[in-house]
Image (cartoon, rainbow, N blue to C red):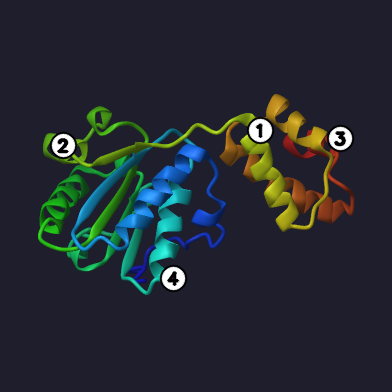
Amino acid sequence: MDQLGLPFALNAKMLWCNFIGDKNQQIVEFLTHLFTHPSSSVVYVYGGKSSGKTHLLQGCTFEALDRSQRVVYLDFGQDMPEGVLNGLEGNDWVCIDNVECLNETQQQELFDLYNRSASTSVKLLVSGNVLPSDLNVIKDLKTRLSLTTLFGLEALSDECKKNIIAQKMNERNLRVEHKIYDYLLKYYSRDLTDLLNAIDQLDKASLQQKNRITIPLIKQVLSI
């Protein structure tokens, strides 16, 4: 994959095989079907913070790489080089994350890419925080994105969030009591990104102090 000198790296743990949610699996199944589809397609997925948009798009990127297809992943939540969207229609897949963050020039470039893609076999996978009709983008792009195949990402239950946290703990060979997860959701945050960042902090603190992750440690590290 040509990363175009972009200032970020893919997260090797953001794979479709560990993407959670029954409804979300329907999206993965649809995208998997597109790998055998010969013509171009545009898919738009939307959801709020920590809904899994980046996980889905990076998972698609890894799937394309595994299939030896040409793919570019762009996260517009970060600064992008000028003209980064130009000429991408020659790829098999282009995954565009956080479309709501595009500036007006980039919005026009995406509109042009959308139009050029119609005569190729490229698949565009675009994510945003709201429906296309609610995006604050130029009218032409809003109209185009409203015509795509639309999917809303499933809001994860607290139990799903706990399972994800437990999975991350297991990956680090950490064993904690289940009440720790309950405590974090009740007193710290129910946002998955916040919770996963907290796990990073707690892991480092437990290693430094050579202690298990306990509620007193959580209070100390997270200032609850």
Q: Position of residue 31 (x, y in %)?
A: 35, 53
Provide the residue designation for mark 4.
66
Provide the residue designation for mark 3.
216
- Residue sitting at x 22%, y 42%: 148
> How far separated are the C-alphas under marks 2 and 4?
35 Å
Q: Earlier in the sequence, mark 3 or mark 4?
A: 4
Q: Position of residue 183 (x, y in %)?
A: 76, 29
Q: Amino acid at mark 2?
A: Ile
Image quadrant occupied by the C terminus: top right
The label on residue 159 is 1
Q: Amino acid at mark 3?
A: Pro
Dot 1: element: helix
Provide the residue designation for mark 2.
138
Tell me if 106 is positioned left or right of 1 in this view: left
Q: Mark 2 against mark 1, which lies toward the viewer? A: 1
Q: Amino acid at mark 1?
A: Glu
Report if residue 198 is visible in the image: no
